[in-house]
Image (cartoon, rainbow, N blue to C red):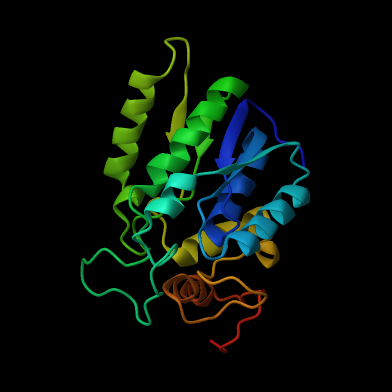
């Protein structure tokens, strides 16, 4: 699928939210897809989902990059700690938070976007209905955009956008269906393997979104929702 308009970089993890962002970018822009490997436990399965989504949209510009420090540093249940058995309560930052992860990922995107001459970077941050990660907040997005302005060439005109940031999961699913996002190719589970667990926080949020949208999730689960 060919986009139109200016070149834009989309961070595509392979998950549900990033697939909707990918669909938006392919609708409005000439797309470049970026996937980051930071030694997360579902890295192989996420990479396969990324490639499948990129193939679905026939994206020619794609980059798979490693962010080795995050895996070496650890401190998250997505990298070296045990996955929690229950969702976080109250305002607690969940164990699945990877310390300052999005800054590493977006910094890579900014470097690539400058080389490509892209004008926008899109990522699938969700503040309203997610796990409470501090780097998925609108305040963080504003601060990062100021960093981009201060830290790139004077002639660079680059904005980082998070079009889903104030949407609920059900709204994201509905928007993805409207755009024809390939949800059947996505992987949201914190674990790897061939079948999503249905129990981790990411699976629960995804299933909640499909329930709210009134449609069936097209991927299989080990534990029936």
Horizontal side of residue 36 vs 130, given as left or right: right
Q: Is residue 117 visible?
A: no
Q: Residue placed at 56% from the left, 57% from the top?
A: 175
**Which quarter of the rendering shows the N terminus?**
top right
Please tell me which residue lies in front, 119 or 39: 39
Farthest residue to the bottom: give it: 224
Residue 107 versus residue 80 in the image, above or below: above
Farthest residue to the front: give it: 72
Horizontal side of residue 39 vs 64, given as left or right: left
Please tell me which residue lies in front, 63 or 143: 63
Q: Residue 4 in the image: x percent, y percent?
A: 69, 31
Residue 91 versus residue 145 in the image, above or below: below
Residue 49 versus residue 55 in the image, above or below: below
Q: Is residue 116 visible?
A: yes
Residue 146 versus residue 142 in the image, above or below: above
Q: Residue placed at 33% from the left, 19% from the top?
A: 150
Q: Residue placed at 26% from the left, 63% from the top?
A: 93
Farthest residue to the top: give it: 155
Q: Residue 2 in the image: x percent, y percent?
A: 76, 37
Farthest residue to the left: give it: 91
Query: How many numbered circles does the render carry?
Result: 0
Q: Residue placed at 56% from the left, 88% from the top?
A: 223
Q: Residue 29 in the image: x percent, y percent?
A: 64, 33
Horizontal side of residue 16 vs 71, given as left or right: right
Q: Residue 176 in the image: x percent, y percent?
A: 60, 58
| Residue 33: quarter of image | top right
């Amino acid at each position: 699928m060919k986009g139109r308009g200016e070149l834009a970089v989309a961070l595509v993890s392979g998950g549900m939210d990033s697939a909707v962002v990918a669909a938006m970018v392919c609708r409005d822009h000439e797309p470049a897809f970026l996937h980051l490997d930071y030694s997360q436990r579902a890295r192989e399965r996420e990479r396969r989902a990324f490639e499948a989504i990129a193939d679905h949209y026939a994206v020619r510009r794609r980059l798979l990059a490693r962010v080795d420090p995050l895996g070496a540093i650890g401190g998250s249940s997505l990298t070296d700690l045990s996955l929690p058995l229950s969702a976080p309560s109250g305002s607690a930052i969940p164990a699945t938070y990877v310390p300052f992860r999005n800054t590493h990922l977006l910094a890579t995107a900014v470097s690539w976007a400058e080389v490509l001459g892209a004008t926008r970077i899109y990522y699938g941050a969700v503040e309203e209905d997610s796990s409470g990660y501090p780097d998925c907040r609108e305040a963080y997005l504003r601060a990062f955009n100021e960093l981009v302005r201060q830290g790139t060439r004077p002639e660079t005109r680059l904005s980082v956008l998070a079009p889903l940031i104030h949407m609920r999961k059900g709204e994201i699913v509905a928007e993805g269906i409207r755009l024809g996002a390939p949800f059947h190719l996505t992987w949201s589970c914190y674990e790897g393997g061939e079948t999503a667990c249905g129990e981790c926080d990411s699976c629960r949020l995804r299933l909640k979104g499909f329930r709210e949208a009134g449609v069936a999730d097209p991927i299989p689960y080990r534990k029936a929702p």
